[in-house]
Amino acid sequence: MEQIDFKPNLKIEKFFLIIEVLIAILIIIIAGIYGGNVLFASIFFLIFLGAVAIVTLAIAIPKTFTKYSITNDNKIIVDYKFITSSKKIYRLDQVTSISLSQGLLGKIFGLANINFGIFGGTSFNPNSTKQGQSYQSLLPKFQTIKDYKKIFNILAQNISLDLNSKIIYEDEPSTKPSVFGFSIFFIFEFISITLLIVGLMNTNTKEKFIMLITGTIGVAIFFIPTITSFFHLLKVKSTKYTIRQDRIVYEDDYMLSATKIIVPNTKITNSQINKNLITYGLFKVGSVKLFTGGSKDPKFASLEDFEGFANVLSKIYSNINNQNQETNNIDYSTNIHTKEESAFKTKPSASFFVTFWFYSTIILLIPTAALLVAKNFIIIEKIIYYAILTGIGILYISLLLLRFILWKNTTYDFSHYKLISKSGILNITTKEIHFNNIKHIELHRKLLFDRAFGQGTIYIFTPGTASTDAKLSSIKEYKDVYEELKEVLGRQKK
Amino acid sequence: MNKTTFKPNIGITIMQTLLFATLLSLPVIALALVFMLTEYANPFYGYILLAVILPLIIFFSITSIGNVMNTTYEITNKFITRKKKFISEIQEDIPLSQITNIDYRIGWFFDKIFGVGTILVYTSGSGSFDITLSNIKSVADKYEQINDLLKLNKSVKLHSNGEILKNRNTMQTESKLLERIKPSAGIATFQLAIGNTIFWIYVTGFLAIIIVPIVTILSYIAWTKKYYDFYTDKVEYYDGFLTLNKSTVTMERITNISENRGILDRLFGTYTINIETAGSARAEVSIKYVKDGTRIVENLKEVLKVHGTNWFQTKP
């Protein structure tokens, strides 16, 4: 394969510049005809247009001097040469996701952007020599490309993806939450508009005033949410999630924009299920996230069959992790809801409560003591005094109760190759971590109260952002679990 | 499986803690004495100040020293481990296969006097968590030891005709120095001098006439002591003026290379080359103010090709 070179397309910028020039000419003509005050106003317009033109040029000029290449040894090169020069070479095998995004202008002019996620931390470290540059800006991206479909497919092929690979599982997000959200905002907006109209027709000045004010405020507050929730609804309606033999695809395509994100199965490091009790209770939906250790990982929200989706996802990337050669023959469609047998289950133990209760008691004692002492120095109304004490009391009991609910919802399941950690109070997160993907582990035993009760807390770190890390709090079997994990880590290849 | 165990240097921690405690407690004691002995304020406040601050300082000193005294480091051929058992217990294990690069740093004051330093170990992953092995005597030796262990995890070596050589476990990739690149100290100093001058004039006013030449000369000397070593299996950066810094990036871990030229670079004919790894954002070597940037990048790519890493992947 030969090297492919291409440049960003400047159709949009050229179009805007032409329009700006035409408007400027129009203004000059009008100013010439009418003169006087119009001339004055037209000068302001011209200055404004000039500023807009400068911004357009500022975007267009760097693009004219940028060149993109896909080499025949699997690299992408972003080459920029104008006054300063920079040539950046990226390895395609480090790419964790490729995404195609098209905004409204892109749709009109037939152009799209291609973005890449790359393996590695996304944290910005102020000690880095890259002063003031966030890691995100260092990721490669192809801006406003004309032949985006062809280039996207070439990139997919270069990272060993088969364009015709078999679809294993398809699903679409449920529109119920977005319909609900849009309806609420729409109803409030409608009520506000009605209030405004009735207010205008009302003859009673006092009522008219109140109605006009509430109406105007309502219309103003609810206008933008109504519009955005409407477009969000359109977006959700057009979204599709697909799990194929070799990749996972997120795509949406509605009036304002189109996005497609593909993640090769081999790049998935962990996955997570999020079940918010409120949205689950109302709409019976949950969401699934997958992580690649890079940035721009897609999220699969509002899924009714989130457990099935997560299960298929888990089978796919666990097969790759365990180097199962028969991925073609595995039937993913049957039994997607059966859970694998776990080898070992555990929950946090006594010190999980005692540590929290101990510290919350101390913390809440401070305002209580302050109140008791203050009572001797300043005069406090009896009712306020008791109200504050009751408030602190209620807060205390709620904290203890919440901790108990958290304990009930937390479980740690181990199989021979992965750990499933489930936790949360209102938002229950189920994290799946494969032992192959663990970066490093830590064991912490604080005197209060892990050591006191003979328990320990294990921290498990995975590639990518901190949200994928697991914490096994205050478990009794910490020694065995830690040694087992360490042994598995020791057998890891690169 | 050989296992090396060592402890951080305690003497230096004791010195640092005592120094810090003294520096902190002296103004507090002075203030308390002022309260107690003079007419300025109620002497009672002086006693309260002492009663609150002194136990805190003592507690802090005991825990700092206790923590360091009870820390052990262990290096096996699979892990680097740090254990601490003082009041609370912590154990951290990093598998060697996850380390992207390592640095060592010898600060110019305490560290140099006592012959100790810090080794920083980087992994790719959440929140750029690294194990800092601090205050280790003979840092350079430990550093080379860890470096050697990392080499054993390397990928296969390709023969020059493309054939994969067998027995990769028994074969150690020889580490031969190919080239030593030194940045142009003069150009670097000149480019930085402009910014420096403005800064010092702003900070010290007319004193800048004395300060700026001194800083410029020191800056020049500092730049002459930096160099980049390109080996067959790694790139090392060495900086040896006041604070000693050394960074090593093994060929395998390199993800991106970029060749940049700012306006001043183009005027003076220099380049900035950034070599990045899949680690936290600071895991990289930045080669600044060097000439022949294109040749350096091409040579680096040649070495990466011969080294047989994943840098050059032919399409399946």
Image (spheres, helix red, strand yellow):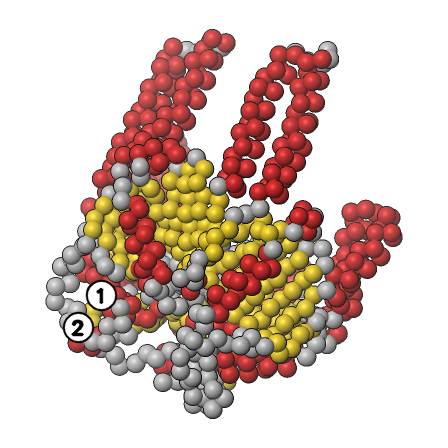
Q: What element carries label 1?
A: helix
Residue matched to label 1: A315
In the figure, residue A435 lies in which quadrant?
Answer: bottom left
In the figure, residue B227 lies in which quadrant?
Answer: bottom right
Q: Are the residues under badges 1 and 2 in a single subunit?
A: yes
Q: Residue at x 47, y 8 (%)?
A: A376
Q: Of the residues under marks 1 and 2, which one precedes in the sequence?
A: 1
**Residue under mark 2: which chain is it in?**
A
Q: Which residue is drawn at 83% across and 47% down?
A: B205
Q: Is B311 positioned to the left or the right of A321 in the image? A: right
Which quadrant holds the C terminus of chain B?
A: bottom left
Which quadrant holds the N terminus of chain B?
A: bottom left
Mark on residue B210? none
Residue B92 vs residue B203, the one in the foreground: B92
Residue matched to label 2: A330
Q: Is mark 2 on a helix, strand or loop?
A: loop
Q: How crowded is mark 2: few (under 14 residues within 10 Å), some or many (20 or more)?
A: few
- In the image, residue B71 sits, relative to residue A52, either above or below, namely above
Residue B266 vs residue A315, the one in the foreground: A315
User: Is mark 1 in CB contact (under 8 Å) with mark 2?
Assistant: yes
Q: Where is residue A361 in the image (x, y as percent from the top left)?
A: 36, 25
Inter-mark Cα distance, 1 to 2: 9 Å
Q: Where is residue A247 in the image (x, y as percent from the top left)?
A: 30, 72
